[in-house]
Amino acid sequence: MFCLLCLVPLVSNAKTSGKTRAEVKRVIIHSIGGPYCKNGSVFYSSSAGNAKRWIEFFNRHRVLGIHYVIDKAGRVEAGVPENQIANHAKGHNADSIGIELVNRGDGKDPYPDKQLGMLVAALRSIIRRWGIDKSAIVAHSAVDKRTFHCGGREIKTKHDPGPAFPWDRVLNAIR
């Protein structure tokens, strides 16, 4: 069995819930980086590395899993097979496919054309395979409302894919 555009074999030892599913209702877009607090200031974690580095990270992780990682060069790596539940968005895993984009998610790190092109191709393929509407493509930040405190402020834990992500461009390209 192959994923997306027959680019990557769907084999993995990534963490899943162990359950398979027959239906997918949405796709959740993530970015690798995210905010954290250090000495009362908010910083964003690094997103250095390519898709291979990050899929290996998810495959080794004790809890987290992801279906796909797409790096800035447009390379894609498959993790958890689409028909299995991956642990990528707390409380929203059972009916979703997760796609991680290699990006800090801080609003400053750009999303290159090659990365966005592969994302569009992946989304078209997923939409066709699972019969979902493009309105079911959502940000991780839209489904995870958790916060943390830093420097006396309440900060949203999940910002991804972040303010630099070109939603209109991606959604219009899916048509």
Image (cartoon, helix red, strand yellow):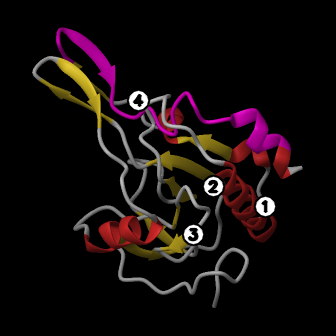
Classify residue 95 by image quadrant: bottom right
Question: Do residues under tags 4 and 2 come within 8 Å of each other at their CB atoms?
Answer: no
Separation of disc 4 and disc 3 at Cα? 28 Å
Residue drawn at 69 percent across, 35 percent down: 167
* Helix, strand or loop under label 1: helix
Q: Can residue 15 be seen in this view?
A: no
Residue 82 numbered tag? none
* Helix, strand or loop under label 3: strand
The 10 Å Cα crowd at callout 2, few under 14, some 14 to 19, many 20 or more, is some
**Residue 91 colored in magenta in the image:** no
Residue 115 numbered tag? 2
- Give, as a three-letter code, the residue at label 2: Gln
Separation of disc 1 and disc 3 at Cα? 15 Å
Q: Mark 1 points at which residue?
A: 124
Separation of disc 4 and disc 1 at Cα? 27 Å
Q: Which residue lies furthest to the right in this view?
A: 175
User: Earlier along the polypeptide chain: callout 4 or callout 2?
Assistant: 2
Q: Is residue 104 visible?
A: yes
* Helix, strand or loop under label 4: loop
The stretch in magenta equals: 150-172
Q: Which of marks 4 and 2 is in front?
A: 2
Using residue 77 as the reference point, say whether residue 125 is left or right of it: right
Q: Where is residue 152 in the image (x, y as percent from the top left)?
A: 18, 8
Q: Position of residue 127 (x, y in %)?
A: 77, 61
Q: Mark 4 points at which residue?
A: 145
User: Earlier along the polypeptide chain: callout 1 or callout 2?
Assistant: 2
User: Earlier along the polypeptide chain: callout 4 or callout 1?
Assistant: 1
Q: Nearer the viewer, residue 43 or 28?
A: 43
Residue 76 numbered tag? 3
User: Earlier along the polypeptide chain: callout 4 or callout 3?
Assistant: 3
Using residue 167 as the reference point, say whether residue 147 is left or right of it: left
User: Earlier along the polypeptide chain: callout 3 or callout 2?
Assistant: 3
